[in-house]
Image (tube, coloured by chain):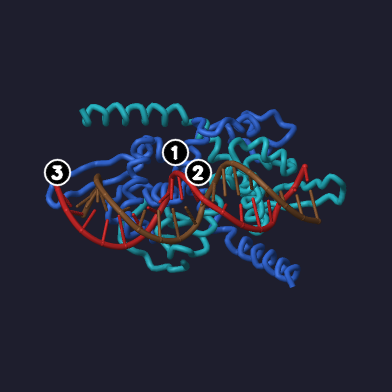
Chain colours: A blue, B cyan, C red, D brown
Amino acid sequence: MEDGTSKSPGYCCETAPDFDVRQWDVREGCEVRQILDRVADKWSLLVIALLDCESLRFSQLRREIDGVSQRMLSVTLRQLERDGLVSRTVHPVVPPRVDYALTPLGRTLHETIKSLVTWTETHQREIAEARAAYDARHEMMDS
Amino acid sequence: MEDGTSKSPGYCCETAPDFDVRQWDVREGCEVRQILDRVADKWSLLVIALLDCESLRFSQLRREIDGVSQRMLSVTLRQLERDGLVSRTVHPVVPPRVDYALTPLGRTLHETIKSLVTWTETHQREIAEARAAYDARHEMMDS
DNA sequence: CAGTATCCGCTCTGATACTG
DNA sequence: CAGTATCAGAGCGGATACTG
């Protein structure tokens, strides 16, 4: 990832930030917000995470991603293709065979997505505990 | 989740992965999927990105995040609080003042979120171009 | 100021059926 | 196999009004 953020968590208040979050409180519907919505989409996330370096067929993706409907997978893939993140290759055979793979651009995003998934894996217990604590705390207040 | 059995050969990258995506094609509604949904949520993302190191008040957040309704901000903040990502501090003054800040756990997530946002910023032009190309390509096929 | 409560439209999504 | 088309239902999310 060649974004200039290799320097540690230092981008806080004082440090001159190469990128200031407060500058993208931009209008709804702006480019960044739009892309963020796409990229942070439930199914997009899973598709990109799965298409690591190998290509997968439609039915393979569908099998791997538990709970996705044919329709939503189709829609998601088309969006990702449109955004240049995923490539779609049709093999002229019968029965039809279509392979999906990450584009170079998609591969750069994959790194980030993966770290998000890894974070989730790593901290799921902490979150579960936080939820339990919150719920317990709240149940007391109700009674 | 902890299944050590190696599956189909030559599936992924050669590099021994500390983390294998194929192992979380887990049930819908499982822990990881649930958290991913929360974390990848439109508003959650923006809230976490904004709460960098300083704490913000409700109305400040609302002003910064263009397009969020009072209701959705409220709901989002409560979810994040429940997950232990954001802390809520009520100051007993009039008028009421409530500060929201990242917890230590939330701060670890912030790093990842930030890289996602940075990625978006960095590649927005490429995506815009990909979209334009896709649309043009498609318009031709329609006519 | 910082919310909660209620109503309700509209989108997103899934199920089903059909095509190349 | 790899989709598209169509429809109906659930729930997300906005607008409004009200409270501490």
The answer to whether the residues at label 3 and label 2 have Cβ atoms under 8 Å apart is no
Left or right of A115 in this view: A141: right
Q: Which mark is residue A112?
A: 2
The answer to whether the residues at label 1 and label 2 have Cβ atoms under 8 Å apart is yes
| Amino acid type at mark 2 | Thr
Which residue in the protein does label 3 denote?
A92
Parent chain of label 1? A
Which residue in the protein does label 1 denote?
A108
| Image position, residue B130 (x, y; %) | 36, 30
Parent chain of label 2? A
Left or right of A60 in this view: A119: right
- The quadrant in which residue B10 appears is bottom left
Compared with residue B20, is residue B125 higher up or lower down, i.e. above or below?
Answer: above
SS for callout 2: helix
SS for callout 3: loop
Look at the image and tell me in which quarter the C terminus of chain A lies: bottom right
On whether disc 3 and disc 2 are found on a single subunit, the reply is yes
Is residue A119 visible in the rendered image? The answer is: no
Comes first in the chain, label 3 or label 2: 3
Comes first in the chain, label 1 or label 3: 3
What separation in Å lies between label 3 and label 2 (alpha carbons)?
34 Å
Please give the name of the residue rendered at 66% of the width and 30% of the height, measured from the top-left corner.
Answer: A17
| Image position, residue A44 (x, y; %) | 42, 47
What separation in Å lies between label 1 and label 2 (alpha carbons)?
7 Å
What separation in Å lies between label 1 and label 3 (alpha carbons)?
29 Å
Compared with residue B23, is residue A17 higher up or lower down, i.e. above or below?
Answer: above
| Amino acid type at mark 3 | Pro
Please give the name of the residue rendered at 63% of the width and 62% of the height, measured from the top-left corner.
Answer: A126
| Amino acid type at mark 1 | Thr
Crowding at dot 2, Cα within 10 Å, few <14 / some 14-19 / many 20+, comes out as many
